[in-house]
Image (cartoon, grey):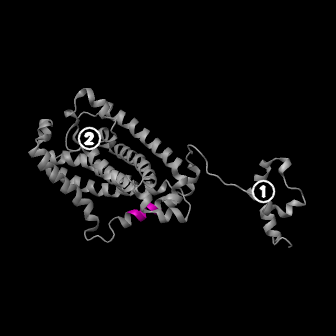
Amino acid sequence: MNDGITTTQRRNLETSPLHTTTDALGPEKMPSAAQSTDYGANVELVIEPKSGWVAVDFRELWLFHELLWFLVWRDIKVRYKQTVLGVAWAVLVPVFSVTIFTVIFGNFAGLKNELPAELIAVYPVYVYAGLLPWLFFSNAISVGGQTLVSQRQLLTKIYFPRLFVPTATVTSGLVDMAISFGVFAVMMAIYGVVPSPRIVLLPLLILLAWAASLGIAFTLSALTVTYRDFRFVIPFMVQAWQFVSPVVYPTAIVPERYRYFYALNPLAGIIEGFRSVIFGTPFPWAMLCISTLSTAALLVYGVMYFRKTERRFADIA
């Protein structure tokens, strides 16, 4: 061929999206039959990213869903790789935290005296019930918020739905939570705590904790790629968030006129829900409804902000 293009290559070129794109140039700019042999040399194709908010391509997510499970399994395997104690850290961290919180906040600060009389004696179990969702949440946003930066080599080499990266990190944390539940069951047996019939609602509360963690992880991971300052902001934010969540104290100590505002913290309703289904205390319907709406808002915003900034990840990661 005099233009260096084989017959097969010419056929592919004529049926490619590039050929269709030239229709948008208008009849006056369309190449003639004679010019068509120089088609590849005369037409300039400009590919530009979409501007503004970008919708989630659920069909694409489903096509790649097997990759998501692979990433989750990979995160589970590497979480405790090259550690001496391995998965035992999933047991030691909550146990040490309960011990410290019970001594400092329960005994020294006297926060256990704010509990109903029947719960004072089981204050360690009460704290552990709050730590279960809190440790999952804090680990999810700490690791998930920096997961795009830590996996920049993966982002710059192949294409796949970027939403899977923080999703896999957050979802793999459910394994640690499951292990912690085993320790919690032993502690309940030791203290003679019998879960209430509302324990059947526990999966819904775990789903809420997962959704809240995912929404914040999406936002923080996208922000950290653009502004590396967030690598230092996230640890401070997690520490501050713990004190505004009812991990070591009941929400009863929050003045009643501020409780609806306090419930905007997703962890407020989730932690109180955990304790209610375990100890049989009154279920915090109003607080949980507000926290659920807050969680939904965080998740929707996180996904939309992630999709809006996703186009720049490969260039700046």
In the rendered image, residue 179, in percent from the top left (x then y), is placed at: 29, 58
Q: Is residue 61 visible?
A: no
Please tell me which residue lies in front, 195 or 213: 213
Instruction: Say if 315 sits above or below 278 in the image.
Output: below
- Above or below — where is 130 with respect to 90? above
Tell me the SS state at disc 1: helix
Residue 149 visible in the current orientation: yes
Residue named by callout 2 = 244
Which of 317 and 85 lies nearest the eye of the viewer? 317
Of label 2 and label 1, which has the lower sequence position?
Answer: 1
Single out the residue that lies furthest toward the top: 257
**Which residue: 43% across, 59% down?**
149
For disc 1, the marked residue is: 19
Q: Quadrant of residue 114?
A: top left
Q: Which residues are magenta?
A: 70-75
> Viewed as shown, does residue 187 lie left or right of 211?
left
Q: In the rendered structure, does residue 73 fall within the stretch colored magenta?
A: yes
- Residue 301 percent location from the top left of the image: 46, 42
Identify the secondary structure beneath mark 2.
loop
Say left or right for 172 vs 274.
right
Residue 186 within the segment the image draws in magenta = no
Q: Quadrant of the N terminus?
A: bottom right
